[in-house]
Image (cartoon, helix red, strand yellow):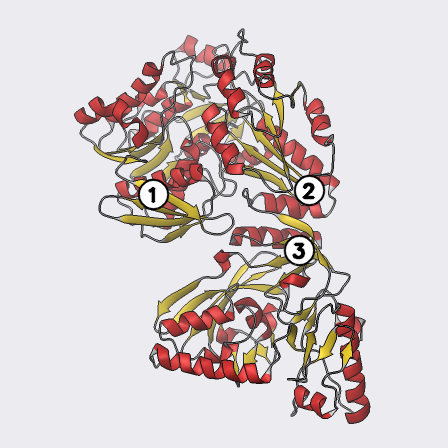
Amino acid sequence: MIESLPQRIHCLGAGGAGMLPLALFLAEAGHELSAEDDAFSDAAKALLSKRGVRLAPFVEDETMGLVYSSAISANHPARVFARRKGSIALRRGECLAVIAREKRLIAVAGSHGKTTTCGMLIDILDTCGFECDFLLGAQFEDGLPYRFAGNDWLVAEIDESDGTIDLFSPEISVIVNVDHDHHARYETEADYFAAFERLIQRTRRSVVLDASVRKRFEKVVALSSASLVTFGADGDYQLAGRGAGPGWSSIDLKGDDELLNMTIDRLGEMNQVDAGFALLASRAAGAKVASGQVFEFRPIKRRQRCRYNSPRSQVFEDYAHHPRELEAVLEQFGKKEGWRNVVVFQPHRYSRTRILKEAFARSLAECERLILLDVYAASEEPVDGGRAEDLLACCRTRRSEVVLAKSPEELWTLLDSQSDDTPSRIIFLGAGAGDRLAGAYASKLKAKDGEWGEVFAALAARSNFSSEIRSQEPLANKTTMRVGGAAELYFEPETLSQLRAVLSAAHASGKQVRMLGRGSNLVVPDEGVSGLVIRLSHPVWSRFEPLGDGRVRVGAGLRIKVLCGQAARIGLQGFEFLEGIPGCVGGVLRMNAGAMGGWVFDVVRSIRYLTMDGEVVEATREELEFGYRYCRELIDAVAIEAVFEAKPEKVEQESIRRTIDTYQSKRKESQPREPSAGCIFKNPDGDSAGRLIDELGLKGAMVGGAEVSGVHGNFIVNRGGATSADVIELVKMIRKVAKERKGVDLHPEAQLFGRSWEEVL
């Protein structure tokens, strides 16, 4: 139990983003809780009930304490009763301050980005094995928004909007920015900055501060006993961010005497800055953060959250409700070729709208289409100049395509009445009802898309701005044969969580999923492929990680040619025979591909794979069943990585390179250079398919643009303009001649993608 708090507590507004984690924390700490909210979600009810919280209205009881959201009116019966009886009644921030007194608090503060930074900080500390309790001011998409384990350290964001920031004396304060806001409480900018000055004065150990406001705090920093680390263009650490593949960023934090690097699954300067603050805060607490670490952060509800992701419609929502936040979020979204951005914005509080409406109009001026909603009052009474109509008038001085929707029904009509077939990204912004509206519209789209709607919704839960699922995607250019039609749906996952979500949703919906590697051992039908085609082409799937003792961990998307080259560079011997196989690790494992007398499972130590219902499985070589051109475990599963083991003798790079060069020369002499699918037939028992086809005199035989190679009889090459039908007819002809003249049944080795050879032969 938390000292200074009563045993029995009633939480009022317990379904709110900040109140729910606090209620769960108190219940876990041993308090007897009851809770109520006018708009409990099913998920919130389930979380509270599971932890023994009684969902019921407030009952007048002098022995029961009250913890309530700052949005709850002073006239609420529970607050009135508490005042009359002198019972303990605390706002959320006041209760959090009581909890923090017993902890070493890492407080995340600032005008914008607190929740995102706090969530990133929690994930970094967890990854580094740094034990801490935490209270997030929102909810993770997956996972609990709190932890109560009795640790000394507590990570929490603290709020200046209601003045409760003055109640905290943190061990470490992280101030990500300071930008005048909450004008009803802080009339002047000086008043607002003073709240953060007092926080710095009360911080005991370290302050991590936005360098752009350092001068405003020089006097208080000079008097503070806490050490100071500034982050920003003129700070102790500067940020250099760059793309690291779709959906990922690589971040360098450059200080006077060191360079810290991290790779994150987020895009845009705003996310990069938030991650930088989280990294510096982790180090200030003493966490051992290794440079070069990769972090996949858990999505947080109402923070750049995707609610639906289909080839025609993407629905996003974000809590941004200040002009600076709007600019940052819209900059992150940017323009997407072939798509229209539709922004739905709900102003938050009349007082903020009245003062900042001109700034809002500037921030929203570049939207392709803007729909305004009524002001979310948050317990305020309307004020002149602060209504939605006032903001509408301001926006119309800068752009003509802006409308006001007074009800959800008006909003749905406006969203559904796009003037053409251009795909749309609908972006809900604001601190009010945007999350509920985004969810409702996503549900409408999901119902409209039928069975695929479940897959699009599951993908959305793990999507970021760059995640895109495409329809009717041409596949010919993604194969080495260069023939065939399009995929019904096509997706290149950026993270393991995306892949798991899509696989499990498709499996549950009974939809077909097909994996495509480098397309080196398959023929795509001209009519295309039904279902969802997934390709692991993102850089995240191409890892090459030496583990020591001759072992190396490789991603399923890594090209075999790159694997051999990387191994040669660090002197690992034994992979040379794989060089020249025109595929990636995942496909080679699935087919147990081989060359030059060796097979890939000769050098595999273990693999990790994903079942079609999303389960990750790890298996050693001894636990796998494999043979000529197959691995049983991967027939209906997706390889995601493997550990390869080199020969024990370490040799010079030049020696390995000479062996690779020898194999390359043999292939160049014995295999055609034209587009092909590799060997088209399996070798008959005790014979060679290429030798047999050569003996039958079929080299040079053609159907349309497809030809039996004159270099190697077991290759069908695309001479230019070949179709899948041409290749299939040539396969039929070769099989017929082999059967009639030699009595040999030739069976295709290359796959007919999306179909079986039995259907066409």
Residue 122 visible, this orientation: yes
**Residue, disc 2:** 312
N-term mark: 2 or 1: 1
Return the x and y of residue 455 as percentages of the image width and height: 66, 48
- Give, as a three-letter code, the residue at label 2: Arg
| Left or right of 560 on screen, residue 712 | right
Which residue has dot 1 on it? Answer: 279
Which image quarter: residue 361? top right
Numbered tag placed on residue 507 in the rendering: 3
Residue 705 placement (x, y as % from top left) = 75, 72
As measured in the structure, the alpha-carbon distance from the residue carrying label 3 to the one carrying label 1 is: 38 Å
Amino acid carrying mark 3 in the image? His
Q: What is the quadrant of the N terminus in the image?
A: top left
* Callout 3 crowding tier (Cα within 10 Å): few <14, some 14–19, many ≥20: some
Of the residues tagged 3 and 1, which is closer to the observer?
Answer: 1
Please say if 260 is above or below 729. Answer: above
Label 3 secondary element: helix
Q: Residues within 10 Å of mark 2 (few under 14, many from 20)?
A: some
**Residue kind at label 1, given as amino acid type:** Leu
